[in-house]
Image (cartoon, helix red, strand yellow):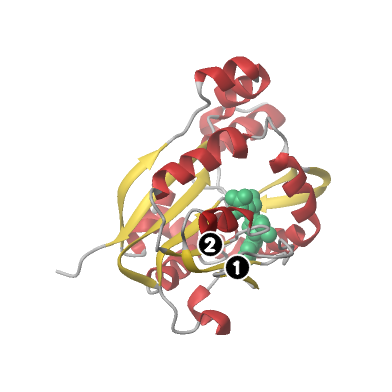
Amino acid sequence: MTGLDRWAAAEAGGDGVRESSQAWVELAADYERGRAREDSLDRLVEWPAERDMLGDVSGRSILDLGCGTGGKLAELARDGAVASAGVDIAGNFISSPPVGVELIRGDLLDPGALPELSGRTFDRILFLQSFGYAVDPVRTLRSAQAMLKPDGFILLTRTQPIRYAVERAEQHGTTLGEEYFHRADYTYRAGWNENIKLTKRTYTMSDLLNVFSAAGLWIESASEPQLTPEAARRYPHKQAWMNKHLGILIFKLRPLAPF
Ligand SMILES: C[S@@+](CC[C@H](N)C(=O)[O-])C[C@H]1O[C@@H](n2cnc3c(N)ncnc32)[C@H](O)[C@@H]1O
């Protein structure tokens, strides 16, 4: 079975992914509380790395898919982004978004089909730790790609698939390899609220890369951000977590030029 066939087969298990999207309605506030902590990996590692790969945003329009509260988008607007929009299924948005930021409650499955986004195009499209909730990932990326302005790019982050394999190997008393290549969906308790369970379709690196190819995208650059030495000294428990689980992957994706 190729990586793409596996994604297609995983469609049958798409219900778990869909339920996880709904679970976010309950989880949203806990996630934001966790993210706001001074030792959150989003603050220490993810957002600085995402911000770095985005570069200068002045005069750029941004679409943030799975935007959470819209707080990151508001920060980008303060840095000069214009005519931007965020979409999130939870609808737990900041109360007064800055001028030029529209926050829309909706599903990121087919962003081009959302009435509020009809006919709109963007310089940057973001999937920051939200792509795993796309029930049909290739469809979602194709739809997003069609909304890119010329010379625009997609910034997409995903958790290292090794992280889930490590957790499952510990739980099941199995090996990393067995779990990394195991195909069943993975249900786990959300770190931000132990009472809420999330389901993720398991994936390998090749699955992820094949999805980008199938959507007609190429990887301009990728990175695996880590704590700075100073942050590692200050928050040794976070360095210990990173040493075991590796962190996230960040991809800058562009449409393939037509031949
Ligand atoms: C891990 S949080 C990331 C939030 C934000 N992008 C960030 O980087 O802080 C995942 C977000 O995806 C949203 N989400 C989950 N399923 C979704 C769906 N089907 N459509 C739109 N948003 C979804 C959740 O509500 C949540 O805000």
x and y percentages locating residue 85 in the rendered image? 54, 69
Query: Can you tell me which quadrant of the image ligand 1 is in?
Result: bottom right
Is 150 situated left or right of 116 in this image?
left
User: Where is residue 230, by image quadrant?
Assistant: top right
- The local crowd at label 2, few if under 14, some if 14 to 19, many if 20 or more residues have their Cα within 10 Å, is many
Amino acid identity at mark 2? Asp
Q: Is residue 185 visible?
A: no
User: Where is residue 142, by image quadrant?
Assistant: bottom left
Answer yes or no: do the residues labelled 2 and 1 have beta carbons within 8 Å? yes
| Residue at the extreme left of the image, as rendered | 259
The residue at label 1 has a CB less than 8 Å from ligand 1? yes
Q: In which quadrant is the N terminus drawn? A: bottom left
Is 207 situated left or right of 9 in this image?
left
Q: Earlier in the sequence, mark 2 or mark 1?
A: 2
Mark 2 — residue? 64
The residue at label 2 has a CB less than 8 Å from ligand 1? yes
Amino acid identity at mark 1? Val
